[in-house]
Image (tube, helix red, strand yellow):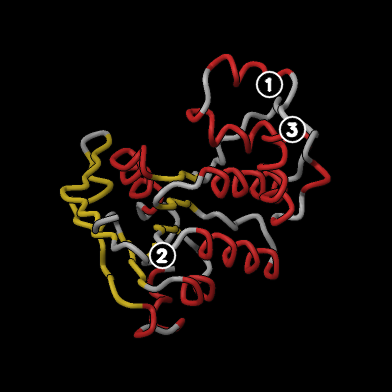
């Protein structure tokens, strides 16, 4: 995987500039964490990057993108729908193949929700739903992870466990986080957004929690 150069990222809404124009470079093997206040443009930036990288990225949006009426298993399996024929996917929907269950189960075990495998997603709590979406992104196995507040519904220890899992599985990632401590712990590079512009782009080792407070 070569470096990804994203130029002229720009979004206007109702004749108002809400993001950019800006330039962002993603380097292979680097975890980039995006920080900033709610409404500053983090989600818009992640969405724009995903629109450009679709086939190369595992996408974990803030709204999770789950199908509530389907089981946990089927929601995770959907990450690899494009790797099988339409007929195969239909049969698996009706009667899940054992080989596919065996591939999905380890991700659910990592998220400590293996006991929910056959429950419909709309029966789960917010934190459980978030872990299903995370398991789906892990199962996808793309080149790069794009994640928008992936641990917002999880408590401290669980959030830490999930971030460790995500960053171990994806060596290249762009992740929006509200938690400064997690940002510095797992990010190798910190990008600070304010009013739709990049106001900070520095290696995490040069920064402190205090220096990032202005972005919240």
According to the picture, the residue beneath numbered tag 2 turns out to be 33
The residue that mark 3 highlights is: 98
The one of 203 and 80 positioned closer to us in this rendering: 80
Residue 97, quarter of the rendered image:
top right
> Which dot marks residue 93?
1
Which of pointers 2 and 3 lies earlier in the amino acid sequence? Answer: 2
Using the numbered discs, state the Cα–Cα distance from disc 2 to disc 3 in whole angstroms: 37 Å
Residue at 53% from the left image edge and 16% from the top image edge: 86
Q: Nearer the viewer, residue 152 or 137?
A: 137
Q: Is residue 145 left or right of residue 63?
A: left
Residue 151, how many percent across, how many down? 59, 58
Work out whether mark 1 precedes mark 3 in sequence or the reverse, and give the earlier one.
Answer: 1
Check the image and report above or below for 175 versus 13.
Answer: below
Helix, strand or loop at mark 1: helix
Residue 25 as seen in the image, left or right of residue 130:
left
Mark 1 Cα within 10 Å, few/some/many (few <14, many 20+)? some
User: Spatial distance from mark 1 to mark 3, Cα to Cα?
Assistant: 12 Å
| Residue appearing at x 40%, y 76% in the figure | 212
């Amino acid at each position: 995987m070569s470096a990804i150069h994203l130029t002229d990222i720009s979004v206007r809404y109702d004749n108002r500039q809400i993001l950019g124009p800006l330039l962002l470079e993603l380097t292979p093997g680097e975890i980039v964490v995006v920080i900033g206040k709610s409404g500053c443009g983090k989600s818009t930036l992640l969405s724009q990057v995903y629109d450009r990288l679709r086939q190369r990225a595992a996408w974990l949006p803030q709204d999770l993108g789950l199908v509530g009426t389907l089981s946990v298993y089927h929601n995770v399996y959907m990450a690899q729908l494009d790797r099988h024929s339409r007929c195969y996917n239909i049969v698996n929907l009706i009667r899940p193949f054992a080989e596919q269950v065996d591939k999905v189960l380890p991700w659910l075990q990592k998220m400590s929700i293996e006991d929910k495998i056959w429950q419909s997603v709309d029966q789960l709590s917010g934190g459980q739903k978030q872990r299903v979406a995370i398991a789906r992104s892990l199962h996808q196995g793309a080149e790069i992870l794009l994640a928008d507040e992936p641990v917002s519904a999880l408590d401290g220890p669980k959030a830490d466990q999930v971030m460790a899992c995500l960053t171990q599985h994806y060596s290249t990632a762009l992740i929006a986080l509200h938690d400064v401590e997690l940002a510095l712990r797992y990010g190798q590079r910190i990008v600070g957004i304010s009013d739709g512009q990049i106001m900070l782009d520095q290696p995490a080792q040069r920064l402190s929690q205090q220096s990032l407070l202005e972005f919240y």
